[in-house]
Structure formats: C-alpha cells, structure tokens
Image (cartoon, helix red, strand yellow):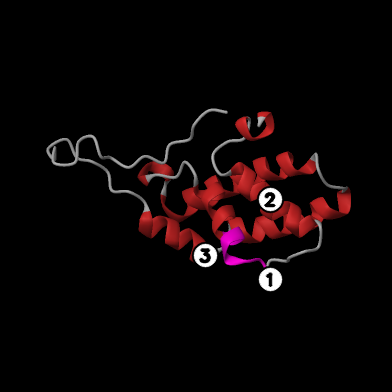
Amino acid sequence: MEFLGGCTPYEADALRAMLSIAAGKSTLETMPQYDRSALNRYLNFGCDKETGGVDGIRAHRQKRALGLIKSVSQYVGKEEIIDITAMLLTVSSDRQDIQTVLDNLPKLQTSGANHNIGNVPSNAPMPK
C-alpha cells in the first residue's frame, strides 16, 4: 500500500505495462489494448488546452515518459531499460495518440458561460 500510495495518478498501471515489456511478455506490437490505454492515460495526465497543441502535447508526453523510465529503472536491468526507453519514445511521439489527446482535451470555460460552473473537467497534475 505504501508503494501504491506513493505513485502519481496512473503510474502504477503504466509501471505494470512496462514491467510486462521488460519481462518479455509483450512488445509494442503485442501490447494488450488495456496496457496501451493505461500507458496513454499516464502520458496524457496533466494535458489541457494550454499545453500548446501537438508540439506541446508531444513534449508533455515525452517528459512524462522520462519520469516513467526513471521509476521503472529501479526494477529492471540495463537491457530491459533500453527496450522500455525505445518503446516509450515511440509511444510518447505517436501521431495518432497525440491527435486523440488533442481532440479530447476539455474545452476552456469562458468567463461569460456560467452554465458549466462546478463541472469543469480537470486533468491537472496532482502532487505525489
């Protein structure tokens, strides 16, 4: 519980997916959709309209990928971390995944529109 409590949102599932890659149980091509979704949730967490379009989202996802590499590196060897790094760089830069994020970002609330007050979706990062 202490480990899970120390994880950022979506980090535990993303770590599980990376450890599956490290163990040779899956590859980028054979990764189950639920693992790909878990990884994308982790990479996308904190994106909002201010992230800066495709380039901003890509930079955000790559920064999150580096954080995940650091987290998983304490559980795997050098050879496995190379495989994980290559896979994460590919996924974090995937055009289709980035476009999906961009298409699904919550709309900004304008000051004149009060019909949605209290229901503004938030994807802001939460501290550890």
What amino acid is labelled 3 in the image?
Answer: Arg
The residue lying furthest to the front in this view is: 1
**Mark 2 element type:** helix
* Dot 1 and dot 2 residues touching (CB under 8 Å): no
Give yes or no for residue 75 being in the magenta stretch.
Answer: no
Q: CA distance from mark 2 to mark 3?
A: 24 Å
Left or right position of 11 against 75: left
What amino acid is labelled 1 in the image?
Answer: Thr
**Mark 1 element type:** loop
Picture residue at 57% right of the left edge, 54% below the top: 38
Mark 1 vs 3, N-terminal side:
1
| Nearer mark to the viewer, of 2 and 3 | 2
Mark 1 vs 2, N-terminal side:
2
Q: Position of residue 13 (x, y in %)?
A: 62, 48
Mark 2 vs 3, N-terminal side:
2
**Any mark on residue 16, and which?**
2
Quadrant where the N terminus sits is top right
Left or right position of 105 against 120: right
Return the residue at label 3.
95
**Any mark on residue 73, and which?**
none
Picture residue at 81% right of the left edge, 63% below the top: 24
What amino acid is labelled 2 in the image?
Answer: Arg
Q: CA distance from mark 1 to mark 3?
A: 19 Å
Return the residue at label 1.
30
Quadrant where the C terminus sits is top right
Q: What range is drawn magenta here?
A: 30-36
Quarter of the image where one finds residue 114: top left
Give yes or no for residue 33 being in the magenta stretch.
Answer: yes
Picture residue at 48% right of the left edge, 50% below the top: 57
